[in-house]
Image: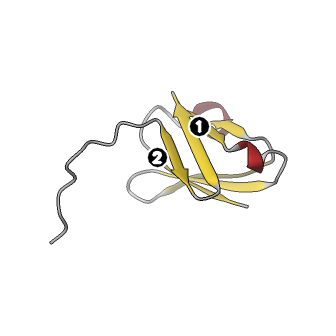
Amino acid sequence: MPSAVKEPVTKRTFQSPGMSVKKAAGKITLDPSFAGKTKSVAVYDLGGKLVGVKTLSKNSMDLQKDFGVPNGVYVVKVKL
């Protein structure tokens, strides 16, 4: 059985090798090393339903403006 999370996730920045994502009120900004590169961005609701896919070259996106989704929690998949 998986162990329980002992500390809540409170960071507004996610980092992994070669990638950094910052989130603020529906806006997502990728690491500057991704600037100018074409990215496929898919947004899913928590039920796993695809709510939007776009190809973007900008380094930041606003979920409400770019994808037309209401405020909420979403899974965002970015492919280079």
* Residue under the image location 69 percent in, 37 percent down: 60
Q: Is residue 50 above or below residue 69?
A: below
Q: Disc 1 designates what residue?
A: 63
- Viewer-proximal residue, 79 or 7? 7
The total of numbered circles placed on residues is 2
Give the Cα distance between marks 1 and 2.
9 Å
Q: Which amino acid does label 2 sit on?
A: Tyr
Question: Where in the figure is residue 78, as x and y percent of width and height?
Answer: 64, 56
User: Left or right: where does residue 26 sit relative to residue 18?
Assistant: left
Residue 74, which numbered label? 2
Q: Callout 2: 10 Å neighbours few (<14), some, many (20+)?
A: some
* Residue under the image location 58 percent in, 44 percent down: 21
- Viewer-proximal residue, 36 or 48? 36
- Viewer-proximal residue, 74 or 50? 74
Q: In this view, does 59 lie above or below 46?
A: above
Q: Is mark 2 on a helix, strand or loop?
A: loop
Which sits earlier in the primary sequence, circle 1 or circle 2?
1
